[in-house]
């Protein structure tokens, strides 16, 4: 936790993009909630998973029929980290931003993305996801929630 504060000192915002099945996302969230405010950071953006994002029907994508379950423990770990953020009372403006479905690995920046509920068929390019994160730092529109983004046609 002290290392989070030390590394983030002097910054206005932080982006957390962790992908390590050996890491506890709840522990990561707790460390960020402790260290970032101590460093004066006011905004946290977390790259999340579509798997835990609600569909238009309000059901988490991971709980929809036919959704792959071989990584369910990984999904649940991300959900635990999101729950830590949702339950926090610290003065930190956080947001989880996920692809609404999956990342389009072959596509570049289109400059067109939109907020969307979870949908396994949805796609967003890495570049458009990155722009969505940066836009939420420069001009925050969502606070203390989880949103999905997809490339707009």
Image: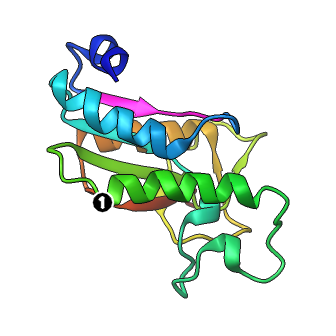
Is 140 situated left or right of 78 in this image? Answer: left
Q: Is residue 112 visible?
A: yes
| Residue at left offset 46%, top offset 33% | 16
| Residue at left offset 46%, top offset 36% | 28
Kindly indicate the quadrant of the structure image that contains residue 60.
Answer: bottom right
Picture coordinates of residue 11, whole percent (x, y): 23, 19
The quarter in which the N terminus is drawn is top left
| Residue at left offset 33%, top offset 60% | 86
Where is 123 relative to 126, above or below? Answer: below
Picture coordinates of residue 69, whole percent (x, y): 81, 66
Q: Secondary structure at mark 1?
A: loop
Q: Residue furthest bottom?
A: 57
Kindly indicate the quadrant of the structure image that contains residue 105.
Answer: top right
Is 122 situated left or right of 43 in this image? Answer: right
Where is 145 relative to 134, above or below? Answer: below
The quarter in which the C terminus is drawn is bottom right
Indicate whether residue 17 is drawn in magenta. Answer: yes
Instruction: Find the magenta span and give its range.
Output: 13-19
Indicate whether residue 89 is drawn in magenta. Answer: no
Which residue lies under the disc numbered 1?
87
| Residue at left offset 53%, top offset 53% | 98
Q: Work out whether residue 95 or residue 116 is closer to the camera in this orientation and state it.
A: 95
Q: How is the image coloured?
A: rainbow
């Amino acid at each position: 936790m002290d290392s989070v504060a030390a590394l983030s000192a002097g910054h206005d915002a932080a982006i957390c993009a962790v992908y390590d099945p050996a890491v506890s996302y709840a522990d990561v969230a707790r460390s960020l909630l402790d260290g970032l405010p101590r460093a004066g950071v006011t905004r946290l953006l977390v790259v999340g998973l579509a798997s835990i994002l609600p569909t238009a029907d309000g059901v988490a994508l991971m709980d929809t029929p036919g959704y792959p379950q071989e990584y369910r423990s990984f999904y649940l770990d991300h959900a635990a980290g999101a729950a830590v953020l949702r339950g926090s009372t610290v003065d930190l403006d956080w947001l989880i931003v996920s692809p609404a479905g999956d990342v389009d690995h072959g596509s570049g920046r289109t400059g067109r993305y939109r907020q969307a509920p979870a949908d396994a068929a949805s796609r967003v390019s890495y570049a458009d996801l990155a722009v969505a994160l940066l836009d939420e730092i420069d001009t925050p529109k969502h606070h203390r929630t989880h949103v999905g983004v997809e490339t707009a046609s």
